[in-house]
Image (cartoon, rainbow, N blue to C red):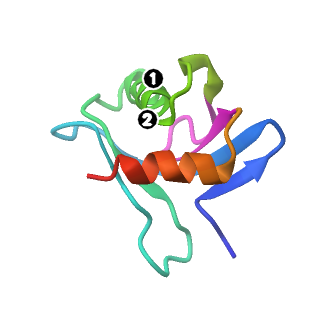
């Protein structure tokens, strides 16, 4: 089963799709039954010069209760689809934090 959040050594990975230039920062859960589930993250930052990537790290760190340096971009530096590594969290903990922030 393909999951949007997976445990890995030292933390977990979260598959996300970033929507830059949104009216505000928010989280949407993966669609049920999707072949490639991803958490949709809306950010008000533009997708230029790494601003959306920096905003994504900051926003996810806040939601997940981590320091910014514990949230890193693993895949998708120039893509809207990204994989984020959250250091020190299990997949279950990350999913719980994300679900609490769905808007």
Residue occupying the far left of the picture = 23
Question: Disc 2 on helix, strand or loop?
Answer: helix
**Height in image: 42 above or below 3?**
above
44 relative position to 13: left or right: left
Percent of width and height locating residue 57: 49, 28
Name the residue located 36 percent from the left edge and 26 percent from the top edge: 48
Predominant SS of the magenta segment: strand
Q: Which residues are magenta?
A: 72-87
In the picture as drawn, the residue positioned furthest to the bottom comes out as 33
Mark 1 residue element: helix
Q: Which mark is residue 63?
A: 2
Q: N-terminal of the two: label 1 or label 2?
A: 1
Kindly identify the residue that appears in the image at 69 percent across and 46 percent down.
90
Residue 5 included in the magenta stretch of the image: no
Quadrant in the picture for residue 92: bottom right
The residue sitting at 84% across, 41% down in the picture is 9
Q: How packed is label 2: few (under 14 Cα within 10 Å), some, or many (20 or more)?
A: some
Residue 74 lies within the magenta run: yes
Q: Which residue is mark 1?
A: 54
* Of marks 1 and 2, the one in the foreground: 2
């Amino acid at each position: 089963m393909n999951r949007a959040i997976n445990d890995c050594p030292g933390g977990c990975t979260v598959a996300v799709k970033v929507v830059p230039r949104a009216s505000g920062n928010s989280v949407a859960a993966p669609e049920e039954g999707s072949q490639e589930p991803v958490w949709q993250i809306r950010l008000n930052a533009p997708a230029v010069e790494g601003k959306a990537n920096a905003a994504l790290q900051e926003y996810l760190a806040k939601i997940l209760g981590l320091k910014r340096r514990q949230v890193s971009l693993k895949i998708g530096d120039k893509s809207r689809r990204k994989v984020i590594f959250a250091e020190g969290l299990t997949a279950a903990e990350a999913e719980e934090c994300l679900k609490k922030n769905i808007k």
